[in-house]
Image (spheres, rainbow, N blue to C red):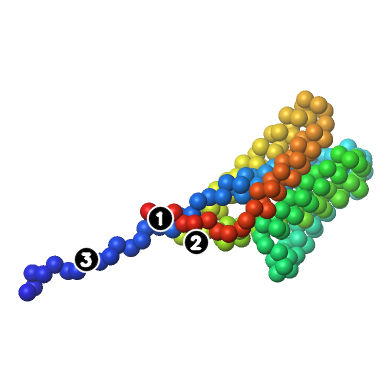
Amino acid sequence: MGDELPTARRPLRSPASQRTPLVWGLVLAYGIAGIGYTIPATYLPVMARESFASPIVFGWSWPVFGLAAFASTLLVSRLQARYSNRQIWAAGHIVMAAGLLLPVALPHIAAIAAAGFCVGGSFMVVTMVGMREAHRLAPPPDVIRHIAVMTTAFATGQILGPMMASAWFAATGSLSGALVLTSALLLVSVFALVQPTSPPRRIRT
């Protein structure tokens, strides 16, 4: 009687059974956003100084950038009431791309300030909705993996952006080519963001 073996318990599902495939188009788009953000964030004050000698004038490039970033965080919740994460994310890339082209088309302090507004107002939106999209795509046990890969891609973009811009400037004496190239990458990445938004199937193990 007392020698009976206890009933075997059904093994718990392993965390690996909750894994979802990474959406590499989104990962790449998030990395490109890192490039698009960090080049103007690094070089806007330099570009403003070259455009206008007075520090009272060119010093406004950073405050405009920061104010736009702050205001954009207040706008995201209203946008999400009407649009999906990816729609907002794609719009952010378009605004950022336009901001990068402004100093190329019009090398003036006003264009540089407008560029700061566009990039500052879009990069926070992109990072916020990008993380929300990661939460939407992955179940709670797996969302950390998605966020980690996307964050790594963004950080890699932040490293590659200034390196590319610096090399371009050393070769040509201008940042215009780097700004145009990055703007083109942002616009191309929009195609990855407008794909169907249904969550990927979980990988059974």
Residue 139, numbered circle: 2
Q: 170 above or below 153?
A: above
Report the side of 13 relative to 79 (left or right): left
Identify the element where label 1 is drawn: loop
Of labels 2 and 3, earlier in sequence is: 3
Circle 1 residue: 204
Which image quarter: residue 49?
A: top right
Q: Position of residue 35 (x, y in %)?
A: 69, 42
State the image quarter where residue 15 is shown: bottom left
- x and y percent of residue 77 in the render? 70, 67
Residue for point 33% across, 63% down: 12
Label 3 belongs to which residue? 8
Q: Earlier in the sequence, mark 2 or mark 1?
A: 2
Q: Amino acid at mark 3?
A: Ala
In-front residue for pair 176/27: 27
Label 3 element class: loop
Give the foreground label among 2 and 1.
Answer: 1
Per the model, the C-alpha gap separating discs 2 and 1 is: 13 Å
Secondary structure under the numbered disc 2 in the rendered image? loop
Q: Residue at coordinates 69% horizontally, 48% vertically from top-left?
A: 191
Mark carried by residue 72: none
Instruction: Look at 76% across and 30% down and name the residue there.
Output: 168
